[in-house]
C-alpha cells in the first residue's frame, strides 16, 4: 500500500476554518482532482461531511468512531488500522482533516502540498509539521490567483 497525503496549506500550515477550506483556487482544485483520480481517498467524518458528496472516480473511505455511521458512496472504517486494512494495496491519499493527517503522517511516503504564500490568523485546523529533512522536495509548478502566489510541492521520503 502506498500512503500519500495531499493538502493546501498557508504559511503557518493552516488548512481550514469552521470545517471549510480557507482558500479556493481553481488550479489547486484541478491539481487535487488530477492527482487523486482513480486512487483511494481516506478522510475523517467531518471532512466527508464538508463535501457535497463522495468524490467521484475514487474509492472513498471515511474514518468514524461511530459504528452506526453511514456515508453514502463511501466505506466506513472505525479506526486508522481498519482504514489501512480496507485500502489494502490501493494507492491511497489522506485528504483530511487535521487529526487524520496527524495519525497518518508516520505512514506517508509522499506528501503533496500546495504551499500558499498567505496566512489565516483565525484558522482552526492545521496540517502537522513534519521533518522536511526526511524528504526530498520537488517543485511541480507555481501559480497565483488574485495576487496570491502558491506552489505545488511534492515531498518524497528518503
Image (cartoon, rainbow, N blue to C red):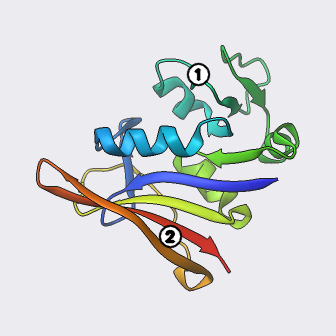
Residue 86 x %, y %: 85, 37
Provide the secondary structure element on which disc 2 rests: loop
Residue at horizontal 25%, vertical 56%?
143
| Quadrant of residue 131 within the rendered picture | bottom right
Q: Is residue 150 left or right of residue 41?
A: left
Q: Nearer the viewer, mark 1 or mark 2?
A: 1
Residue at horizontal 76%, vertical 55%?
2
Residue beneath disc 1:
54
Provide the secondary structure element on which disc 1 rests: loop
Residue at horizontal 79%, vertical 34%?
78
Label disc, if present, on residue 16 of the rendered structure? none
Q: Residue furthest bottom?
A: 133
Sequence-wise first label, 1 or 2? 1
Residue 129 visible, this angle:
yes
Rendered-image quadrant of the C terminus: bottom right
Q: Residues within 10 Å of mark 2 (few under 14, many from 20)?
A: few
Label disc, if present, on residue 129 of the rendered structure? 2
Residue 151 visible, this angle:
no
Amino acid at each position: 500500500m502506498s500512503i500519500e497525503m495531499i493538502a493546501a496549506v498557508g504559511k503557518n500550515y493552516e488548512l481550514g476554518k469552521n470545517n471549510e477550506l480557507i482558500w479556493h483556487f481553481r488550479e489547486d482544485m484541478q491539481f487535487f482532482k488530477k492527482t487523486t483520480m482513480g486512487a483511494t481517498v481516506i478522510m475523517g467524518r467531518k471532512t466527508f461531511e464538508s463535501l457535497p458528496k463522495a468524490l467521484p472516480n475514487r474509492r472513498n473511505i471515511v474514518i468514524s468512531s461511530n459504528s452506526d455511521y453511514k456515508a453514502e458512496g463511501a466505506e466506513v472504517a472505525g479506526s486508522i488500522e481498519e482504514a489501512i486494512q480496507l485500502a489494502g494495496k490501493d494507492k491511497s491519499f489522506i485528504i483530511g482533516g487535521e487529526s487524520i493527517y496527524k495519525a497518518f503522517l508516520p505512514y506517508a511516503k509522499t506528501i503533496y502540498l500546495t504551499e500558499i504564500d498567505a496566512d489565516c490568523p483565525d484558522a482552526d485546523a492545521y496540517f502537522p509539521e513534519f521533518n522536511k529533512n526526511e524528504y526530498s522536495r520537488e517543485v511541480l509548478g507555481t501559480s497565483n490567483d488574485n495576487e496570491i502566489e502558491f506552489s505545488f510541492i511534492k515531498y518524497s521520503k528518503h
